[in-house]
Image (cartoon, rainbow, N blue to C red):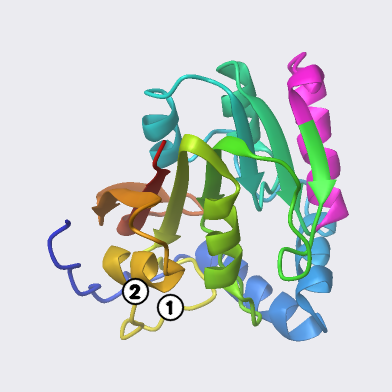
Amino acid sequence: MSSPEPRPQSAPKLSEGEAHARDECIREIHAANDAASFWEQLYRGKGSVWKDTANPLLAETARHLTPGHALDLGCGEGGDTLWLATHEWHVTAVDIAPTALQRTSRLAARNGLESSVRTEQHDLAETFPSGTFDLISAQYLQTPYAFPRAGVLRRAAHALTPGGILLIVDHGSVRPWAWNTDPDTRFPSPEDIYDELALDTARWTPQRLATPQRVATGPGGQTATVTDTVVAVRRLP
């Protein structure tokens, strides 16, 4: 089990570029009528939203696993999907936004990996990909809209093959460039997130519950030390 999560420190002063990025995100949230519209507008309105590189905790976890079939929930523009496909995984990449899926497909094709990547559009509050997976990745699967997240992640755990891993990584501290910069924001602990899944301990076990810190770079180049919340769940053979 991890040590108690440190209380977030006051956010550092934003640069003009960071403040603009945050304010633009807030405007987009209020402009969209629902989650699907918000995420599609976010991607369609920008040439690129995220980096093409993998989230570090996914790479750290997956490099120790035998490649098989992976599911990337909320794949965005495909950085994690690309890393997995490059490392011999066959990936089903899922997002609510058609533009995000198009960019994921193009990224895979540019790298000669289109045969290893399948994209599917899902509003995970309503539908979920069929099949079973050796690795299911939920990297920062968070939204400013109502979302039955615990139920979606519980369904993901049930879609694991025996021995498969569900990796959940959440924001665990305030990022100064994010739409929510309230320093008093409470972030659930890894134990809170795991307990919400309400999984049968005879069939699943927590493999890692932790709150590591890292230096992150915002969209305007500002850096800050941030906390991630990590929950890795293994389905027992």
The quarter in which the N terminus is drawn is bottom left
Q: Nearer the viewer, mark 2 or mark 1?
A: 2
Q: Is residue 93 above or below residue 212?
A: above
Residue 193 is drawn in which quadrant?
Answer: bottom left
Residue type, mark 1 in image: Thr
| Magenta span contains residue 146 | no
Q: Which residues are magenta?
A: 97-117
Horizontal arrangement in the rendering, residue 72 relative to residue 208 (left or right): right
Residue position for label 1: 181
Q: Position of residue 10 (x, y in %)?
A: 26, 76
Residue position for label 2: 188
Residue lying farthest to the front in this orientation = 202
The quarter in which the C terminus is drawn is top left
Q: Position of residue 175 (x, y in %)?
A: 40, 66
Residue lying farthest to the left in this orientation = 3
- Labels 2 and 1: the sequence-earlier one: 1
